[in-house]
Amino acid sequence: MSSPSKPHPYEAVVRHSGEVAGPIRLPESDSQRFIEAFNRLYRSAGLSITAVQPPATTASPNHDATADRH
C-alpha cells in the first residue's frame, strides 16, 4: 500500500520533554482553549502543544478582514 502523495496540513506540534514528537490537527473552534487545557493537563507528563500558525478563529464567515485594516 502506498502512502498519500500529499501530506495532511497541521496547525500545531506535540512536544515531549521539549522535543518535537509529531504534528497535530487542532479543533476548528476554540483552538487556543484546547491548547491551554492540553498543556495544563499533560505538562506534568512532559507533553505540550505548540501552535505553528495562529489557531483558527471563530470569526463569522461573513467577516471582512479588509475592514480591519482601516
Image: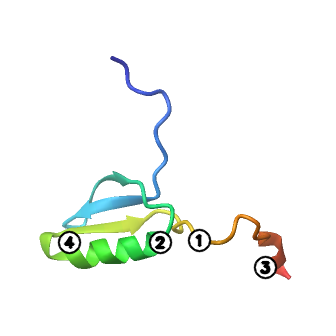
Instruction: Look at the numbered discs 4 and 3 and tell me whether their residues touch, using CB distance below 8 Å.
Output: no
Q: CA distance from mark 1 to mark 2?
A: 7 Å
Q: Residue at x 58, y 70 (%)?
A: 57
What residue is shown with label 4?
42
Q: Position of residue 64 (x, y in %)?
A: 80, 70
| Residue type at tag 3 | Asp
- Residue found farthest to the top: 1
Task: Judge the density around disc 2: few (<14), some (14-19), many (≥20) Cα neighbours within 10 Å.
Answer: few
Instruction: Look at the numbered discs 1 and 2 and tell me whether their residues touch, using CB distance below 8 Å.
Output: yes
Residue 5 as seen in the image, left or right of residue 34? right
Residue 35 drawn above or below residue 24: below
Q: CA distance from mark 4 to mark 3?
A: 36 Å
What residue is shown with label 2?
30
What residue is shown with label 3?
68
Specify which label sits upstream in the sequence, 4 or 3: 4
Q: CA distance from mark 2 to mark 3?
A: 21 Å
Specify which label sits upstream in the sequence, 1 or 2: 2
What residue is shown with label 1?
58
Looking at the picture, tell me which residue is in the foreground, 25 or 69: 25
Residue 8 drawn above or below residue 27: above
Task: Judge the density around disc 1: few (<14), some (14-19), many (≥20) Cα neighbours within 10 Å.
Answer: few
Q: Nearer the viewer, mark 1 or mark 4?
A: 1
| Residue type at tag 2 | Asp
Residue 20 drawn above or below residue 41: above
Specify which label sits upstream in the sequence, 4 or 2: 2
Numbered disc 1: secondary structure: loop
Q: Residue at x 49, y 47 (%)?
A: 9
